[in-house]
Amino acid sequence: MQEKLNIAVFVDYDNIEIGVRSTLRRDFDVSLPLDALKERGDIVAKFAYANWARQDAATRQMAENAVQMVQRIPSPRGDKNGADINLALDALEMAFTHPHVNAFAIVSGDSDFIPLVNKLKEFGKRIFIVGGKAFTSTILQQNCHEFISYEALMDARGDRPPTPTPVILPDRRGEEPRREEPRREDRRDRDRDRDRDRDRDRDRDRDRGGDRGGDRPGDKFQRNRPAPLELPHVMSLVERALQVLERREVKPQLGLLKSTMLQLDPAFSEKAYGANSFSDFVDRLKKANLIETKGHGGTYTIERKGTGAGPALKPDEALPTLREVLENHRLELEDGGPIDDLAGWLADEFPHFDVKAYGFQELSELLNFAQDSFVVRLERDHEKGTTVYLGAEFYPPALPPAPDPEPTDEEEDDGPQPYVEGQPTMMEPNPPPPKPAPVRKRAPRKVAGDKPARKAAPRRKKTD
């Protein structure tokens, strides 16, 4: 029996809000990840971290969803990672002091949370990451237990809440049908949303000098749902999951197959392939003649079919083409450039290049993947959107200075060295001490009155 999940939710509001706003051109809605997490377990705690004095519009939706707002006061010198540190400390404290909390959900796309995710996994906690595929670090996506795509949550609910339509009812007298007006609360919400969108568009037009730049995609806050990925891209993951279940000697049923696929790739989502549910996803694979099923309902088993499409291209195989385009336009990207310009260069120089062939739904997802490989560097802004810069691999570090040549055993012969008395030499490390100079005896001094010394008489020779 699967353990009941008690989930603690931690929202890095600054990161997720700027990611959704700059990439998806939408305001962040905290109810989307909360509703998705409720389907996976019970939410027992909800925290959001930001400088709420500057987020007046967001405080209302946080209060409506009972999210506890943790105030982060920036220091005078700035604290870029202040919210990250507070969030990580509170999450670890909860892991130590609340043993009943066995799952953590981090709503952010920042790769700085990878150490926190690894530490929580060491304590046996299940980790959910909620963020956009276009701005969440791919390393973070692959190191959690399940990655929940914010784009998929938006598409499931719809880009905008539906406007209440009047209901036509017959008149009591049976003369003409009359229209029933929406409720006052619905009209108030509708008018507030319309006024907010109008004020936002007007402020943006004023900042840009009244020019909308030719109706660029982000200016009108319209997002077209990307086309679903081709099914052959997922077959390598399906095959790996089926092999794992075969080694475990377990029948590959529907729910077990999905859990195994999430274990191998936490970023997997059937919605990226146009399916509303996993059973619908399996039906699509079956209709595409990629798998075989036995049984009926949720109890049928899944088997790999021998025929089908060939292996799909891997994501990293798209990087050489991207590198070539970046190198060709290196001067234009020295100070950064918008994604639209890069998309135009790709279309002009490589007309047959399609990001969907490599498993990406949009170009922004490819750039997000390339950022983790140091091919590009992305900066996101509320108004400007995403700006693309050349990555670190285009600026290799300077070569280190050449080391000094190591001394060799063979040294140059400088000729005989002069001998200095009392100093060691190479030829004779310890020379003998010099001989003392002979001492000359002085003649005795003559003193007046002294008699001269007698000379000894010569010896006589003896005669025979």
Image (cartoon, rainbow, N blue to C red):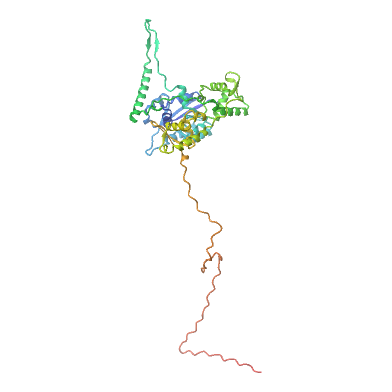
State the residue at coordinates (49%, 34%). 321
Q: Quadrant of the N terminus?
A: top right
Q: Quadrant of residue 11?
A: top left
In the rendering, at what x and y percent does residue 398 appear? 46, 45
Q: Quadrant of residue 387?
A: top left
Note whether 396 is above or below 429 in the view shown. Answer: above
Pick the residue in front: 446 or 421.
421
Q: Quadrant of the C terminus?
A: bottom right
Pick the residue in front: 1 or 250.
250
Residue at the extreme bottom of the image, as rendered: 464
In the rendering, at what x and y percent does residue 374 appear? 48, 37
State the residue at coordinates (59%, 18%). 296
Pick the residue in front: 24 or 52.
24
Let me know if residue 84 appears in the view: yes
In the rendering, at what x and y percent does residue 406 appear? 53, 54
Task: Tell me: 174 left or right of 422.
Answer: left
Q: Quadrant of residue 32?
A: top left
